[in-house]
Image (spheres, helix red, strand yellow):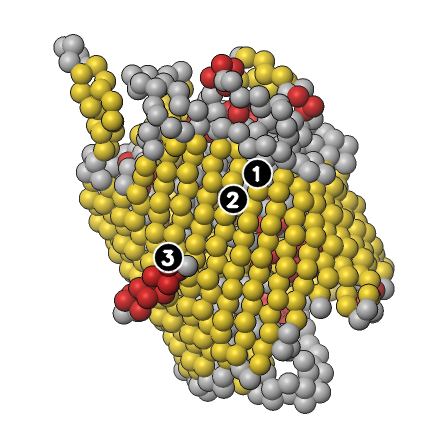
Amino acid sequence: MKRIIGILVCLPAVAALPARPSHIPVQPPKQTADSAMTAPKDSTGIYKNVTLHGVDVYGNALRHNLIKYSQNAIQVDRNYLQTHFGGSLMQSLRGIPGVKAMQIGSGQSKPTIRGLGFNRMAVTEDGIKHEGQQWGDDHGLEIDQFAIDRVEIVKGPAALLYGSDAIGGVINLYSNYVPGRSLQGSVTLFGRTNNGSVGLSAKIEGLHNGFYFRANATSIDYADYRVPTDVIQYYSYDIKLKDQRLRNTAGYERDGSITMGYMGYRVRTDLKVSDTFSKSGFFANAHGLEVRLSQIDYDRSRRDIDLPCQWVNHLSVKSRTVWQNDRMVVEANLAYQNNLRKEMSEPVSHGYMPQPDGTLERRFNKSTYTAKLGMHLDLSKANTLNAGVSAEYQHNRRGGWGFILPDFETATAGIYVFDKHQFSQALTVNAGLRYDYARTRIHSYRDWFMTPVAGGDSVYKQRSADIRRHFNSVTWSAGLTYAQGSWILKANVGKSFRVPIPKELGVDGVNYHIFRYERGNAELSPEESYQMDAGIIWKRGRAEVELSPYFNYFPNYIYMNPTPNYYEGLQVYHYTQNRVLRYGFEMRATYRILPCLEAQLQGEYLYARQCSGGKKGYGLPFSPPMSADAELKYTFDRRKPYREGYVSISAHAVGRQDRIVPPEKPTPGYCTIGMTAGKTFQICGNALKVGLNADNLLNRKYFDHTSYYRLIDVPEPGFNVALMLGMNF
């Protein structure tokens, strides 16, 4: 409590820092038809105060949303997340074309968009960029997926509005809807068979005289997960699995948040405090061969969390205020985030390091202060202007007897302007310009033990030098949307950039979880990208087709390059920069066979090629292969929302990936079968929703090319059924 009070006291001190507005400044509240709430103002997403008295509004909202943005954006609501529940937020979103979940354990996954992840895409929550430790390869997003009301995925360059990390796209999460009644809530129960996951999430919220509140709480426990194999290989050693389970992959998660706010005629303001905690084990045999000598009985229980393991705690305090009149909206955001992560393992000597004391191998404590100020102005009925400024400061402090990343501080500031002009109902054009400045300091570090050097002496080996770097860049974009009859056409062109992160500049250590020794490069320059992407949408009658081709050229793509050198038996990888060409497409075709029966086919393709450097002609590591999905869905009782139900069967086919980078190996293709079903029941005036999601029905053994575990012959999870029960009250 003292920690939270101290944060709230310090937040006003950063109020003078500039900020930029969120992509969708204000969210419409949930409401009843005869209440005095807010309604859409125009295609910008800004909302005006009006009074509705039992009015029914009809129109093609989907077409309106498709026309208003030139970027390729997909929006899904809470119902989609419940229908496609997969264990983590990204596993629930992985069915969207171009979006993948890089699995790193039974309860963890990393998001990627069009093959770009980590610090090449941004995740925002209510307009504030989520700042954990995105560079980490072995933990997921520290976000409670059951507190999310809506998700917007922008595929392609979004750095103009969101800054450096959005070079490949952005996932916008919204959890700030205003409740429509004085008291309401929901309770959700869920579970998964593959890893014995069980969880409970509850929400309560209310609105009275303009003041509102929301409170969420989630608890999840899961056991070691099952794979369809009895033996894996690590450095040519055969490692047997008990009951086909990856030992020590169990974990749990505890999340909570509370929001207090006020919504008046001109002003809306709220304050949200959230905390996310998770603890999970590392697959013991992936952490190193020393597990063979361990005294720990890893097969004693499938639910215990032994060494090695990690725990992550993410604390977030966010303040958001919006003021508006007939022509202008001003939004201010302040945020503090603290991400504390610890890795524990048995104290084992490596190289010249003596056996250390304690189990704390690594600790990273990262604090981030963010401030944004944005303005939306209607210059005329046809022209709208967005402008904003932003600033961010973060510092990270390390600890533990192991080393991979030194202490660092970074500070960034940006300013942008974005204009949209609607020439007619059919044609809209937009363009924008942005300037960013960034400063990074990495502290020097020496080992705490002596290492022999030439001449017979021993020294405290320097692992990181003192590095000070400054970066700046001008980025731009332009796009248009044209609608005619059954067609909607979109086109975008622009330049983006990304600042090298401290890991790329100063890392020097063993990354046990992805089986390599990593070294940074202090001379890296900012990564630039020139891109074009388009959207072609056709809809007539029962049929709808979407095609989204894209093209990227990187003059200086930052790349983890494998070298012929080894350290402690692990191959050394070194960050470098090369020219890279990427292009591909996503497509989706839907046909309504009957009013209650729908067929859908979707697919994606990505080609990547290095155009310079020692790996010229090769692709990029962990590039997703071509894939396709086919689904047949039957919906019943469509006209009765409280009785609505559905059932669907789907096939997921993935091609062989031969575009690899040595020492990668090609990954064979595969096909899996899945099924989903759901039904809504009316109980005591409340809606009970039941959802069932089954994956890999045939328990097929296959390898995901984007997974690190395939490097040690670990296949993807086997047969799994997820069940969710949700009731609103």
Q: CA distance from mark 2 to mark 1?
A: 7 Å
Q: Is residue 207 left or right of residue 19?
A: right
* Circle 3 crowding by C-alpha within 10 Å: few under 14, some 14–19, many from 20: few
Q: Which residue is mark 3?
A: 3
Q: Contact, CB < 8 Å: mark 3 with mark 1? A: no
Label pair 2/1, CB-CB below 8 angstroms: yes
Tag count: 3
Towards the viewer: 155 or 70: 155
Q: In the drawing, what numbered circle is on residue 278?
A: 2
703 or 594: which is nearer to us? Answer: 703
Q: Residue at x 77, y 61 (%)?
A: 688
Earlier-in-chain disc, 2 versus 1 = 1
Select label 3 or label 1 by which is in front. Answer: 3
Q: Are marks 3 and 2 in contact (CB under 8 Å)?
A: no
Circle 2 crowding by C-alpha within 10 Å: few under 14, some 14–19, many from 20: many
Give left or right: position of 608 versus 465: right
Answer yes or no: is residue 266 visible.
yes
| Residue 1 coordinates in the image, percent (x, y) | 41, 59
> x%, y% of residue 173?
53, 59
Q: Amino acid at mark 3?
A: Arg
Q: Amino acid at mark 1?
A: Gly
Mark 3, secondary structure of its residue: helix
The residues tagged by marks 3 and 1 sit, at their Cα atoms, a distance apart of 26 Å
Q: Where residue 153 appears, x then y in whole percent?
A: 54, 56
Q: Please tell me which residue is depicted at 60% across the width and 86% down the height of the picture.
A: 36
Image: 561 above or below 391 = above
Name the residue tied to disc 1: 251
